Amino acid sequence: MSLDSTKIRLIALLADPDNKVIALSGLWGTGKSHLWHEVKRESNDERIKGALYVSLFGVTTLAQVKQKLVQALLPTDERNASRYATVRQGISSAVKVATGFHSGFSALLDIPQLLAPTLLKDKIIVIDDIERKHINLDIDELLGFIDEFTQQFGARFVLILNTDKLEQRNTWDTLREKVIDNEVVLDTSASEAFDIADIKYKTRFAPHVRKAVESCRINNIRVIQRIIKTCETILSQHDNVTNEVLGRVIPSTVLLTAIHLRGITDGPPLEFVLQTGTKSDWRLDDQVPQDDNIKAKRSAWGMLLVELGINGCNEYEELVVEFLQKGSIDTAGLNNIIARYVHEQDAMNVHSEVRRFYSDVHWNFRIENAALLERARGLVDKVKFLGPDDMTSLSEFTKMLDGGDEVSQQLVDAWVADFTNRPAPEQPFDNIFGRRIHPDIQAALERMEAVAQQQKTLYDACFQVAARSSWGIREEAALKRVTVADFEELFDSSTQDEVRTVIRKMTEFTASKDRYERHFGGAMDVFVEACKKVIREQAYGRLGAIIKSVFASAGIAHLLETEQLDESGRCGGGQPA
């Protein structure tokens, strides 16, 4: 039953005095204790309002149980506590005197044992955390206590049972059969569990977290509290994140935290989630398992990701996992990721706005020309989110309006100004579809590319080829202009890993010179001459011997005996193309 229906049922069972022992059962962490305290707080029945609550967590003896119950009855303010201590001291002194006459009087020292039958008479006693009792507290002894106090002293009991944590199933079956008069089972919904969990935190991200929790069917309140705290901690420095960005980061944060805490029934492993959108994505044909059981599980996991809107994972999810496993967070890395997500969302919003502008220019005859021009002016500060081809299209659409030439040029100028101040992109703009590019924009692209090519170093070019098994015009340009001095500078100032990357990759190019010469010109000849100089001058310690070994392994050791370069530091084929 849901939280509300369970509450109604429990109140009804408590109203019937024939129910001496009531079991409130359900999965761990689903709000059973919370429900009881809520029933007690709202009740008008004096017996329920005066009910005694005891947790058996770590309790080793029945005497401790009685002591906890008796202490729960005593006033807690300092004046009465002091009075109780005085009384206890007086009784203890009297018992010590009596013990001097007969040792049997020492039993009177256990005051709670003496007071329990009188003080617990006709009380409602709630026993929680039964499954967490100490192993030394025998369950039969506890059952005997319950039976004695219900039969002889008119007490009633509410037993809170975590059904997924109970051991000794035969004992609990006996408990249900012989002691419990009625049982109510709590099956808290994910939404109800979230409401209880959020009482403590009042999270800023409640709608997004609730939605993800409901999709994951998480009804463990403690797990949800940890999820909320994780979201709050990770995003603690981001107060004004848009709903779109929250919709990107919250679902994966909730899912990964739940998996880490084992709080999701039959949930996917972390690796399955992190592989979404990669070459190992579960959706790819070559990743489909043959085993039907595994296939069914992966299908269910995949449907969960779809429901959560998780279409791909990247460094954000890796950062979340690192936080869950190590407790620390890369704040700078997170800030960069969030900033990128914000930029991407802003870009999507601008593209949507531009598409609406196109549609209205073409078809909305009810909008005046002046109003459309004003909308175009409103895009001047937003063109930075457009690519060269989309910017050209916006310029052309704006020119279709009467008086649009000036506004069109303002848009282009704004784009060029922003683009010029950006760092060079990793890859040059590739107009693969041959779309028109405004002349001013094309000129800006060419200026940026010239700077980018000049900045590309020998190591950058070799690393690009080594890491990605590919290259572009920037890498070709960098290698075509390389000189012996460039290699010498690299050997002097670079790290061991950088030197190794360059030597290995250049040796590979040299061993297959016919294949690479049309791309890299005379770079291989320059490399050979630089290596010969290293060997000849012995200026780099053991590097000469290492080079000889690498060349021998590649089958090109004979190249180290060829003629030298000309005075320019290049071979004849090494001139830039």
Image: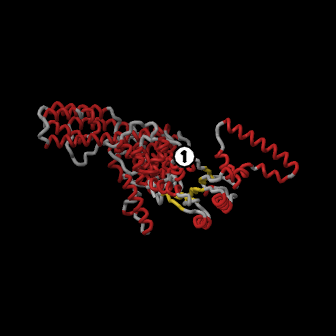
Q: How many marks?
A: 1
Q: Is residue 566 visible?
A: no
Q: Is residue 116 left or right of residue 291?
A: right
| Tag 1 secondary structure | helix
Expressed as whole percent of the image width and height from the top left, the position of residue 370 reads: 14, 32
> Which quadrant holds the C terminus?
top left
User: In this rendering, is residue 25 above or below 404?
Assistant: below
Q: Is residue 308 visible?
A: yes
What colour-coding does the image apply?
secondary structure
Badge 1 crowding class, 10 Å Cα cut-off, few under 14, some 14 to 19, many 20 or more, is few
Could you say which quadrant of the image residue 460 lies in? top left
Q: Is residue 545 above or below residue 140?
A: above
Q: Name the amino acid, label 1.
A: Lys
The residue lying at 40 percent from left, 38 percent from top is: 569
- Horizontal and vertical percent for residue 7? 48, 53
Which residue position holds label 1? 326
Name the residue nearer the viewer: 177 or 342: 177
Pick whichever, 461 or 214, lies toward us: 214
Q: Position of residue 377 (x, y in %)?
A: 21, 32
Q: Nearer the viewer, residue 152 or 528?
A: 152
> Which residue shows up at 86% across the image and 52% down it?
102
